[in-house]
């Protein structure tokens, strides 16, 4: 069942043959054998009829035996031409599994293929070849041969059961044929649908496995057909009640082992594949999906419908689940959404990956999770817009936030939220990440660039192998949002320990990583039709609970500023020391107090490391020395304060920045000197001692 499920979702689409329809007029010349397309093979013709025709003010009918009549309307020709009818010596394939080719001709009128008015092609049919119990109009259809795609393209045709002709009205000439149902076909109807199928094939193989699931079972037909009619009627009623525009007249549903279920855009009928609609819930989804395509075609017209492929698929899958089968749904909407969904641009409608079906989850998120607007309003908004649906959405949706930011929020929801439509059980770094990095203790910095196509997102997963603080930096200056989150372990199941935070270009952020945490960085680009490159750096900023060393110096080569910088003051100071600086998380402190004999030194300070990794530290110093002032005890003092402002440089393994300081020295006896000074200098706080073995102040 799973395999069938996947197959079905892979193939349900608007078929390629429909996409070429707007180019139909251009596809004519290759039929004459001058086509160079490698996919087509030349058609060989045998001329059977040739007749000169002149411009006329009345209709002209030209007949080839009792097989084919060509009716040229008055005024069609502006010069003398030759009408030629040829049979084909190349054998063409049957138009479908349910139809066989009755008759085929190449018709040409001089070298003109395209006309301002429609002319009529009337094929005579033999009623003896048809099932007498069923109307000929139900059994016959017609089309032209698309040699490029090696396929028949059906066109609307009318059947005259008195004259036994099937008539095509067209403004271009090429190879035309008409078809009838293969022997043994059956037709079963409901209020708005007629299902056409081969009962023997359905019952013996194509859908023999199928057990009817609808509460209402129609008798006299296979269960599979009964459910198709029942499900299609359910969808029809739901769409009609919700105010959607449906085609008039009965909608034909062909049922066979087609490659795909589809709405055939040119003729407007539906095909349901026995291969792809394997179970009842999938069949419900498929019938309603294809019928919503009929709504779209009816609302937009064929060309606009075909020009909005991704949006047609996304809305059809949403409507099937949330309108036709509301409440409850089919559970099959965009159900094969893949972990890599965000890596493909939203407007992509390629068959592989079924990306456009999966976009129904984005619609669901807009409509139901964010309640931006109702689905009907969203649909109408795009109906009234151009064929560039993404532009319409971008231009029109500004609340609660601009449409691009809604995509950003959806991307976060998809990646970080346990309720994500990709089923939440996957281990996200392995299955979602565009890139996966390890961040062991020895590595101090990671940097990656990510090309991000428009309306896509990429995820960088970083597995922390060591507890530490790190800084995330946007090194690029592009528009576009970077979001990050830290998860405990390689899964998002109830493990979000930090809500995603956004970072625009040039911003930095600090996070704390424990051993085993995953840092996820999500980059999304919501500039329409423009690819952008994100450049992201993740650096170690400090180590937790570390004791560092700050040297107190005496001149401009000091490591941390303190004391007088020049002149005689140098020699007054007794201090030449490294003092310990403790860093715990974002807190910095100095608590030093030491007495040796008559000497006493106290240093105290506090500081912070801010969100951007910048340390600011202030401290005070007090040094006293007991002296003998002519037999009387006296005290010599040095007192001062200093500041440090700087960032962690992982390459040099130290904090680097600017130090300022000042000192006031009073030595009444021993030195007999006093004075004060201040300075500013390049300063650092080091993980290892600058002067090996240098321990206490010079006490
Ligand atoms: Zn579709």
Image (tube, helix red, strand yellow):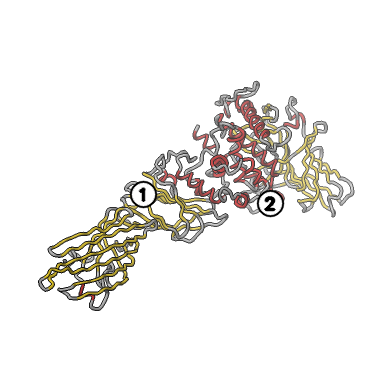
Determine the residue located farthest toward the front in the rendered image.
Answer: 632
Horizontal side, residue 584 vs residue 461: left or right: left
Determine the residue located farthest toward the top in the rendered image.
Answer: 219
Ligand 1 contact, mark 1 (Cβ < 8 Å): no
Name the spot of residue 307 as percent of width and height, x first.
65, 48
Q: Which residue is mark 2?
A: 30
Q: Are marks 2 and 1 in contact (CB under 8 Å)?
A: no
How far apart are the alpha carbons under marks 2 and 1?
A: 58 Å
Image quadrant where residue 102 sits: top right
Q: Is residue 298 above or below residue 541?
A: above
- Kindly report which numbered mark, 2 or 1, lies closer to the viewer in this rendering: 1
Name the spot of residue 654 as percent of width and height, x first.
29, 62
Determine the residue located farthest toward the bottom in the rendered image.
Answer: 567
Can you tell me which quadrant of the image ligand 1 is in? top right
Using the image, tell me which numbered label, if any, was put on residue 671.
Answer: none
Q: Is residue 661 above or below residue 432?
A: below
Kindly state the secondary structure of the residue where label 2 is placed.
helix
- Dot 2 or dot 1: first in sequence order is 2
Which quadrant: the C terminus?
bottom left
Q: Residue at x 24, y 66 (%)?
A: 551
Q: Is residue 124 above or below residue 174?
A: above
Name the spot of residue 290 as percent of width and height, x first.
63, 37
Name the spot of residue 30 as percent of width and height, x first.
68, 51
Mark 2 burial class by Cα count in 10 Å: few <14, some 14-19, many 20+: some
Image quadrant where residue 634 sits: bottom left
- Residue nearest the viewer, comparing 446 with 95: 446
Is residue 91 in view from this perspective? no
Horizontal side, residue 521 vs residue 641: left or right: right
Q: Residue at x 53, y 33 (%)?
A: 331
Q: Which residue is mark 1?
A: 463
């Amino acid at each position: 069942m799973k395999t069938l499920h996947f197959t079905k979702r892979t193939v349900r689409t608007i078929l390629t043959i429909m996409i070429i329809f707007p180019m139909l007029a251009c596809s004519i010349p290759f039929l004459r054998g001058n086509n160079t397309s490698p996919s087509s093979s030349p058609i060989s013709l045998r001329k059977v009829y040739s007749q000169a025709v002149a411009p006329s003010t009345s209709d002209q009918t030209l007949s080839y035996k009792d097989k084919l009549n060509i009716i040229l309307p008055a005024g069609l020709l502006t010069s003398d031409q030759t009408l030629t009818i040829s049979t084909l010596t190349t054998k063409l394939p049957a138009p479908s599994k349910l139809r066989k080719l009755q008759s085929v001709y190449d018709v040409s009128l001089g070298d003109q293929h395209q006309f301002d008015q429609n002319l009529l092609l009337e094929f005579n049919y033999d009623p003896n070849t048809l099932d007498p119990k069923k109307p000929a109009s139900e059994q016959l259809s017609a089309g032209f041969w698309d040699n490029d795609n090696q396929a028949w393209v059906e066109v609307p045709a009318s059947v005259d059961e008195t004259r036994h002709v099937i008539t095509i009205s067209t403004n271009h000439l090429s190879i035309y044929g008409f078809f009838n149902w293969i022997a043994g076909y059956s037709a079963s109807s409901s209020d708005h649908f007629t299902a056409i199928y081969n009962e023997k094939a359905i019952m013996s193989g194509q859908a023999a496995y199928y057990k009817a699931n609808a509460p209402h079972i129609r008798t006299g037909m296979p269960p599979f057909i009964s459910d198709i009619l029942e499900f299609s009627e359910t969808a029809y009623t739901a769409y009609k009640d919700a105010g959607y525009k449906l085609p008039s007249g009965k909608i034909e549903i062909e049922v066979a082992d087609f490659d795909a279920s589809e709405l055939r855009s040119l003729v407007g009928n539906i095909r349901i594949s026995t291969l792809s609609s394997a179970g009842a819930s999938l069949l419900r989804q498929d019938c309603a999906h294809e019928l919503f395509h009929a709504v779209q075609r009816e609302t937009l017209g064929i060309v606009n419908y075909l020009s909005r492929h991704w949006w047609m698929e996304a809305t059809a899958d949403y409507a099937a689940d949330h309108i036709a089968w509301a409440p409850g749904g089919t559970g099959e909407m965009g159900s094969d959404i893949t972990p890599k969904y965000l890596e493909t641009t939203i407007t992509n409608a390629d068959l592989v990956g079924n990306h456009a079906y999966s976009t129904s989850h984005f619609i669901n998120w807009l409509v139901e999770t964010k309640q931006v607007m109702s689905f009907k309003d969203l649909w109408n908004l795009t109906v009234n817009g151009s064929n560039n649906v993404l532009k319409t959405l971008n231009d029109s949706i500004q609340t609660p936030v601009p449409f691009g930011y809604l995509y950003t929020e959806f991307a976060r929801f998809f990646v970080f939220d346990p309720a994500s439509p990709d089923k939440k059980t996957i281990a996200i770094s392995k299955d979602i990440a565009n890139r996966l990095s390890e961040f062991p203790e020895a590595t101090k910095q990671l940097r990656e660039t990510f090309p991000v196509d428009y309306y896509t997102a990429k995820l960088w997963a970083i597995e922390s192998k060591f507890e530490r603080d790190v800084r995330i930096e946007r090194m690029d200056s592009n528009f576009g949002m970077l979001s990050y989150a830290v998860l405990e372990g390689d899964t998002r199941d109830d493990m979000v320990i930090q809500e995603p935070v956004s970072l625009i270009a040039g911003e930095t952020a600090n996070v704390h990583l424990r051993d085993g945490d995953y840092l996820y960085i999500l980059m999304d680009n919501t500039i329409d039709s423009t690819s952008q490159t994100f450049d992201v750096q993740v650096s170690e900023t400090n180590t937790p609970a570390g004791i560092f060393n700050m040297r107190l110096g005496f001149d401009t080569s000091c490591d941390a500023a303190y004391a007088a910088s020049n002149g005689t003051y140098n020699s007054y100071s007794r201090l030449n020391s490294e003092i310990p600086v403790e860093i715990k998380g974002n807190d910095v402190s100095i608590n030093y107090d030491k007495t040796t004999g008559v000497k006493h030194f106290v240093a105290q300070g506090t500081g912070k490391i801010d969100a951007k990794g910048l340390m600011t530290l202030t401290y005070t110093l007090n040094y006293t020395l007991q002296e003998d002032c002519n037999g009387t005890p006296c005290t010599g003092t040095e007192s001062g304060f200093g500041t440090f402002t700087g960032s962690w440089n992982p390459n040099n393994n130290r904090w680097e920045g600017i130090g300022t300081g000042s000192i006031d020295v009073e030595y009444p006896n021993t030195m007999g000197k006093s004075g004060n000074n201040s300075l500013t200098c390049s300063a650092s706080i080091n993980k290892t001692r600058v002067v090996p073995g240098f321990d206490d102040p010079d006490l």
